Image: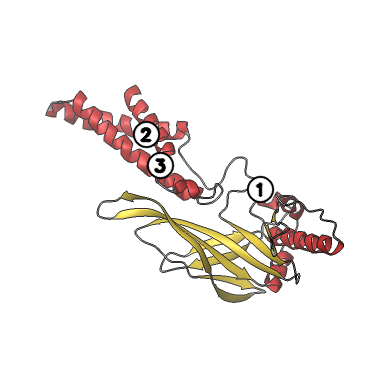
């Protein structure tokens, strides 16, 4: 039993470290669940192969191999679950330290807004990418420093395992209770890694896209916010198959609009109080 357990722990550790080539480029807060699942699958395959090798050398005769199948496989299966659970390979969509959405306020988000700006830039970028939450998208505001015009968008990282690209090209949403479909701008496409299935290869794909959002829509999303509520604005990304749904917190829109207003006011007065980070 202890030998099987050691095999399971080794496989779990391998699952954590056997990261597919290119996966390190994934954002730390997005796509983590898909990548973790992929590493667990790799680890389990390693575990099965290691246990089979162990069983071959330890039980050479057919009779002993039958005994292994009859009596030791259950212990081996138990050791898989025990080791994976003990070593922390089991992944879920939530974490113990994750902040409850109903407790996230616009003020909290506003303090984490990332500003990218310099004296040589013609546009300033403000985004909610700095929010400490396990998610795969954020709002962005591009401010034209000459005209004061603001262009909003939602940046999404669509990570999935499949036999081929899904080529996400549009996003459906509802603004003021009116459905709309918006073409997306493809920012990047990457393959994080591949693994062989029975007859095909499954790969982990990463499509990063931007969805333009007009100012009126951002204002409407912000109007959905109520203190203590858990309301979300939903985006459905459409590709060749298997749509992916993202949810945006209304308090993000409230915080971003407030930060943009402050940035424009400070530029007009020349105070420069907001510091890029």
Q: Is residue 54 visible?
A: yes
- State the count of labels: 3
Residue neighbourhood size for the residue with mark 2, other residues' Cα within 10 Å, grouped as few (<14), some (14–19), many (≥20):
many
Closer to the chain start, of discs 2 and 3, is: 2
**Image location of residue 80, percent across then percent down:** 37, 34
The residues tagged by marks 2 and 1 sit, at their Cα atoms, a distance apart of 33 Å
**Image location of residue 205, percent across then percent down:** 42, 56
- Which residue: 35% across, 51% down? 194
Decide if residue 267 is on the left or right side of residue 157: right
Instruction: Determine whether 114 is above or below 66 in the image.
Output: below
* Label 2 SS: helix
> Which residue is farthest left?
62
Nearer mark to the viewer, of 2 and 1: 2
Image quadrant where residue 118 sits: bottom right
In depth, the one of 265 and 205 nearer the eye is: 265
Residues at badges 3 and 1 in contact (C-beta under 8 Å)? no
Q: Dot 2 corresponds to which residue?
A: 11
In depth, the one of 49 and 96 nearer the eye is: 49
Instruction: Determine whether 206 is above or below 100 in the image.
Output: below
As drawn, the label of residue 40 is 3
Decide if residue 159 is on the left or right side of residue 274: left
Q: Dot 1 corresponds to which residue?
A: 100
Instruction: Determine whether 198 is above or below 59 in the image.
Output: below
The residues tagged by marks 3 and 1 sit, at their Cα atoms, a distance apart of 27 Å
- Which residue: 19% across, 29% down? 56
């Amino acid at each position: 039993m202890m030998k099987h357990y050691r095999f399971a722990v080794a496989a779990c550790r391998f699952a954590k470290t056997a990261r597919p080539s290119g996966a390190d480029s994934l954002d730390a807060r997005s796509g983590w669940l898909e990548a973790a699942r992929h590493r667990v699958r790799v680890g389990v395959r390693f575990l099965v192969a290691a246990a089979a090798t162990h069983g071959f050398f330890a039980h050479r005769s057919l009779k002993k191999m039958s005994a292994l199948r009859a009596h030791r496989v259950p212990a081996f299966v138990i050791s898989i679950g025990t080791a994976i659970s003990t070593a922390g390979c089991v992944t879920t969509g939530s974490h113990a330290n994750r902040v409850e959405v109903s407790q996230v306020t616009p003020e909290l988000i506003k303090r984490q807004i990332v500003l990218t700006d310099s004296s040589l830039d013609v546009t300033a970028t403000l985004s909610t990418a700095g929010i400490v939450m396990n998610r795969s998208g954020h709002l962005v505001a591009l401010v034209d420093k000459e005209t004061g015009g603001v262009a909003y968008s939602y940046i999404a990282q669509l990570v999935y395992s499949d036999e081929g690209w899904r080529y996400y090209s549009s996003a459906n949403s509802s603004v003021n209770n009116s459905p709309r479909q918006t073409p997306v701008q493809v920012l990047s496409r990457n393959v994080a890694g591949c693994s062989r299935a029975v007859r095909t290869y499954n790969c982990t794909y990463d499509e990063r896209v931007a969805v333009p959002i007009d100012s009126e829509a951002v204002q409407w999303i912000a109007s959905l916010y109520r203190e203590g509520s858990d309301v979300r604005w939903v985006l459905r990304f459409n590709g060749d198959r298997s749509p992916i749904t993202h949810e945006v917190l209304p308090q993000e829109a409230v915080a971003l609009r407030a930060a943009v207003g402050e940035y424009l006011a400070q530029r007009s007065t020349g105070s420069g109080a907001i510091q890029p980070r």
